[in-house]
Image (spheres, helix red, strand yellow):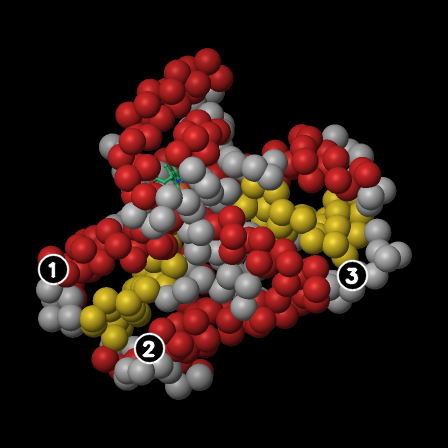
């Protein structure tokens, strides 16, 4: 990064727990977020949040224990920030998380110390959702209080270089096999149906993204037995987007499945625990012969190129 640069690139993401206390913090902040629990009354939401956190914490923690007691999201994001700081001349890169540190306040204090006014916000969500993108942007803007020139980067699921990074991850996971022998399932984090019905564009953008990637695979001559989309991570009794991943997996007894986590940029507990351990157990019960999960783009060199293209930064 050059000494005269006065721009910041701020990566926005959800956060991830580093220990059990942070898991409690993550869940408490998440369920107090009005974009997640769309109950109008702050008091009622905080009561519901308390109830959910109390009933969920211990079982959720058991999942994190199976992946070493922390979410991989933090160390992987730090690697991405370091790589961007080595690669970008025009801006210094920071990260801000929504539910666990580093929070917006910390980053904004650093920006003020460094007298940086021009700030580019890059939500690390390829498709827009009120529950993720909007929540992170609102959070940053609220703390930033009009003191910066903010540029907000739009959802980037159509970006060609990013999609090439995804194709690379897909083909790498099956490089020792024939893609024709696998059923490719794009797995997206689920969303309550009522949030979609209220106008959230996530489902449409996820559908568009699957179509773009399917066409790109065809163009590159990479053939799969089938390509489909399913939703993981349903929480609570409400109706969520369908088909659910466990139902979709039931179609592939005696067959092979390759999962690509289409809503994530950085590997996290939902990829390392839920997809790679929990759904793998389901796949074994169903009788799926070979079940594999692709890595997210994380800090891949080609994703660094994609970020340069998306942000127009050098
Ligand atoms: C009511 C709940 C939830 C909505 C809506 C939701 C949307 C949503 N989430 C992600 C990405 C991630 N979610 C992660 C964990 C996670 N998500 C929820 C609930 C909702 N998510 C919970 C309760 C949890 C904690 C784990 C659990 O108890 O199941 C993570 C992982 C973070 C980590 O620790 O590594 C990610 C990433 C998206 C993209 C999304 C909507 C589009
Ligand atoms: Fe989630
Ligand atoms: Fe989950």
Q: Is residue 234 depicted above or below 212 in this figure? A: above
Q: Residue 113 in the image: x percent, y percent?
A: 82, 39
Q: Is residue 86 left or right of residue 261?
A: right
Q: Which residue is mark 1?
A: 286
Q: Residue at x 54, y 68 (%)?
A: 300
Q: Is residue 149 depicted above or below 288 in this figure? A: above
Q: Residue at x 63, y 47 (%)?
A: 95
Quick one: label 1 or label 2, which is nearer the N terminus? Answer: 2
Q: Which residue is mark 3?
A: 1
Q: Which residue is mark 2?
A: 174
User: Foreground: 217 or 205?
Assistant: 217
Secondary structure, mark 3, is loop
Q: Residue furthest bottom?
A: 221
Indicate which label's residue lies in the foreground, 3 or 2.
3
Q: Is residue 41 left or right of residue 87?
A: left
Q: Residue 46 in the image: x percent, y percent?
A: 44, 18
Local packing at callout 1 (Cα closer than 10 Å; few below 14, some 14-19, many 20+) is some
Residues marked 3 and 2 touching at CB (< 8 Å): no
Q: Looking at the rendering, which quadrant does residue 310 occupy?
A: bottom right
Q: Residue 150 in the image: x percent, y percent?
A: 75, 44
Q: Residue 283 in the image: x percent, y percent?
A: 18, 60
Q: Looking at the rendering, which quadrant does residue 280 occupy?
A: bottom left
């Amino acid at each position: 990064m050059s000494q005269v640069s006065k721009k910041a690139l701020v990566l926005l993401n959800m956060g991830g727990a580093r220990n059990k206390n942070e898991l409690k913090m993550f869940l408490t902040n998440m369920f107090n977020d009005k974009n997640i629990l769309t109950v109008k009354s702050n008091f009622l939401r905080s009561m519901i949040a308390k109830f959910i956190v109390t009933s969920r914490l211990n079982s959720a923690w058991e999942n994190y224990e199976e992946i070493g007691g922390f979410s991989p999201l933090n160390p992987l994001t730090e690697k991405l920030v370091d790589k961007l700081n080595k690669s970008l001349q025009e801006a210094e890169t920071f990260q801000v998380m929504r539910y666990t540190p580093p929070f917006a306040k910390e980053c904004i204090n650093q920006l003020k110390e460094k007298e940086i006014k021009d700030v580019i916000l890059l939500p690390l969500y390829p498709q827009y959702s009120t529950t993720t993108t909007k929540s992170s942007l609102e959070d940053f803007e609220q703390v930033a209080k009009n003191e910066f020139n903010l540029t907000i980067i739009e959802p980037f699921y159509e970006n060609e270089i990013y999609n090439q990074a995804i194709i690379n991850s897909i083909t790498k996971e099956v490089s020792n096999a024939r893609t024709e022998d696998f059923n490719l399932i794009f797995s997206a984090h689920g969303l309550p149906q009522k949030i979609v019905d209220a106008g959230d564009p996530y489902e449409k953008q996820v559908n568009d993204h699957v179509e773009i990637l399917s066409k790109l695979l065809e163009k590159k001559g990479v053939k799969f037995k089938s390509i489909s989309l399913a939703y993981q991570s349903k929480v609570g009794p409400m109706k969520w987007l369908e088909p659910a991943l466990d139902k979709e997996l039931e179609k592939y007894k005696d067959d092979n499945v390759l999962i690509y986590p289409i809503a994530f940029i950085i590997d996290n507990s939902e990829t390392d625990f839920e997809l790679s351990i929990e759904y793998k157990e389901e796949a074994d019960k169903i009788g799926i012969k070979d079940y594999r999960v692709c890595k997210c783009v994380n800090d891949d060199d080609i994703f660094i190129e994609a970020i340069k293209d998306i942000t127009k930064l050098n």
